[in-house]
Image (tube, rainbow, N blue to C red):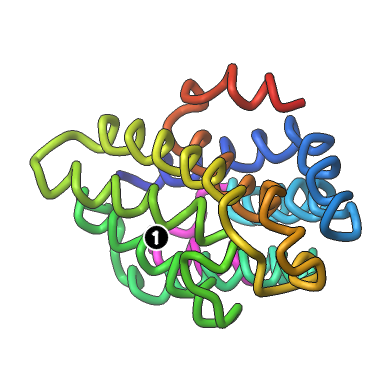
Amino acid sequence: MNQQELIAMLERISRIMGENRNYLIELDSIVGDSDLGLTMGDGFLAAYESVSDGLETDLGKLLYNAGKTMGNKVPSTMGTLMAAGLMRAGKILKGKTELSAADVVALFEAYEAGVADLGKAKPGDKTFLDGFHPGVQALKLEVEAGKSLEEGFKKAAEASWEGFEHTTTMVAVHGRAATRGEASRSLKDPGAAVAALMMKAVAGGEIVETQISSEK
């Protein structure tokens, strides 16, 4: 993955958040304060625009700068978590001007670690991680099996969507949803939806389109 491909990936994530702004607002209105769609749309747009000129050739610095800009633009809980993921990925890829398939896996693993460490959460807590972690693991397995990044991203998108859907089996332990206790189990987690949308965008936007549309 070269610089332009990485910037294009950030642009796709920004675009899918904008396109699904109302969907995220609807999900968040049940368990949050209804601002998730605005936060993710504005935050990822700012992240993309901050590096879209292509002047930064160090891909680690590019990701770090995108994350720092996002954190400043949307300093909400979710915005800060997403920014932390970008910044952690930037730190571990510092000095690289091109990413191998293994580097791309490391990028996503670092993103997950950045979010998990700051949020003090783990898979199973009914958060962003329950959508993101399955996707990262699917990508890693495909790459380790010698498959292309394109194939890996497709599997990651499918796994992330399944992870998001699976949040209806979990009781929330973080945020406002946690105050509902057992009543939170049947609800879909908005953060996990963000993860599913991210992975869909990474895969080129072709995966789970009908599923997302049917949820609106």
User: Relative to the observer, which residue lies in front, 86 or 52?
Assistant: 86
Relative image position of residue 40 (x, y in whole percent): 73, 51
Q: Quadrant of residue 209?
A: top right
Badge 1 local density, few (<14 within 10 Å), some, or many (20+)? many
Q: Residue at x 61, y 64 (%)?
A: 82
Whether residue 65 is situated above or below residue 167 in the rendered picture = below
Residue 55 sits inside the magenta stretch: yes
Relative image position of residue 1 (x, y in whole percent): 30, 44
Locate residue 163 relative to residue 44 in the image: left or right.
left
Q: Tell me the element at label 1.
A: helix
Relative image position of residue 27 (x, y in whole percent): 79, 44
Q: Amino acid at mark 1?
A: Leu
Relative image position of residue 36 (x, y in whole percent): 80, 53
Q: Residue at x 89, y 52 (%)?
A: 34
Locate residue 209 relative to residue 23 in the image: left or right.
left
User: What secondary structure do most residues of the magenta stretch adopt?
Assistant: helix
> What is the residue that sits farthest to the front in this orientation?
182
Locate residue 165 relative to residue 77 in the image: left or right.
left
> What is the residue that sits farthest to the left in this orientation?
146
Q: Residue at x 71, y 64 (%)?
A: 182
Q: Quadrant of residue 58?
A: bottom left
Q: Quadrant of residue 83?
A: bottom right
Q: Residue at x 63, y 64 (%)?
A: 171
Q: How many marks?
A: 1
Magenta extent:
53-68
Residue 70 sits inside the magenta stretch: no
From the image, tell me which residue sits under label 1: 59
User: Which of the image's four quarters has the C terminus?
Assistant: top right
